[in-house]
Image: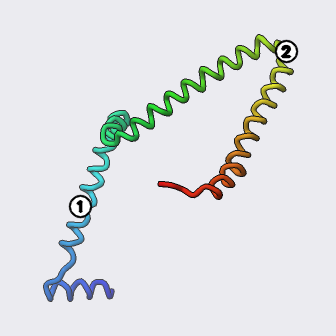
Amino acid sequence: LCAERAYRLARRHGFDPYQEIKDAQAKKALRKEEVTNSNNNSLVTKARDLFHRVPTLKALFCEVLAFQCMSTILNVSLVTTLKQSIPNDVARAAWTGRFYAAINGVSAAFQFIVLPLGFNKVPPQW
């Protein structure tokens, strides 16, 4: 009831918001259509464009790929050597578990004890 009266007053005095509302809805529909059209591009095309735009991303991708390949090769080599050295599956699993526990322990010690203490004693130089 009050809304009708407000619209009537707006029309009478020349500031009817109908055209602005209609324009806003048209812009919203246009934006929605643009998003739909941009989604039609394949993910590969979007990724390729991103890698061309940001060369650092391409370098990081190559670094990760190289380290993953090296890690896989070393892991396969370790498993193969262990299989020859320790033929018993249970003993090999126990040795592998202790090995990875030791690696994680050393990593945690460096991350949470050695490096923070070292950084406190050595001032950063940029």
Foreground residue among 56 and 15: 56
Location of the N terminus by quadrant is bottom left
In front of the other: label 2 or label 1? 2
Q: What scheme was used to colour the molecule?
A: rainbow
Depicted 63 relative to depicted 35: above or below? above
Foreground residue among 88 and 73: 73
Q: Residue at x 45, y 37 (%)?
A: 60
Q: Residue at x 82, y 18 (%)?
A: 89
**Residue receiving disc 2:** 88
Going from the N terminus, do you reach mark 2 or mark 1 first?
Answer: 1
Depicted 119 relative to depicted 18: above or below? above
Which x, y percent locates residue 78? 70, 19
The quarter of the picture where residue 10 lies is bottom left
The quarter of the picture where residue 69 lies is top right
Q: How crowded is the residue under tag 1: few (<14 C-alpha within 10 Å), some, or many (20+)?
A: few
Q: How crowded is the residue under tag 2: few (<14 C-alpha within 10 Å), some, or many (20+)?
A: few
**Residue receiving disc 1:** 27
Determine the CA span between mark 2 and mark 1: 70 Å
Which x, y percent locates residue 53? 30, 42
Is residue 104 toward the left or the right of residue 25 in the image? right
Q: Amino acid at mark 2?
A: Asn
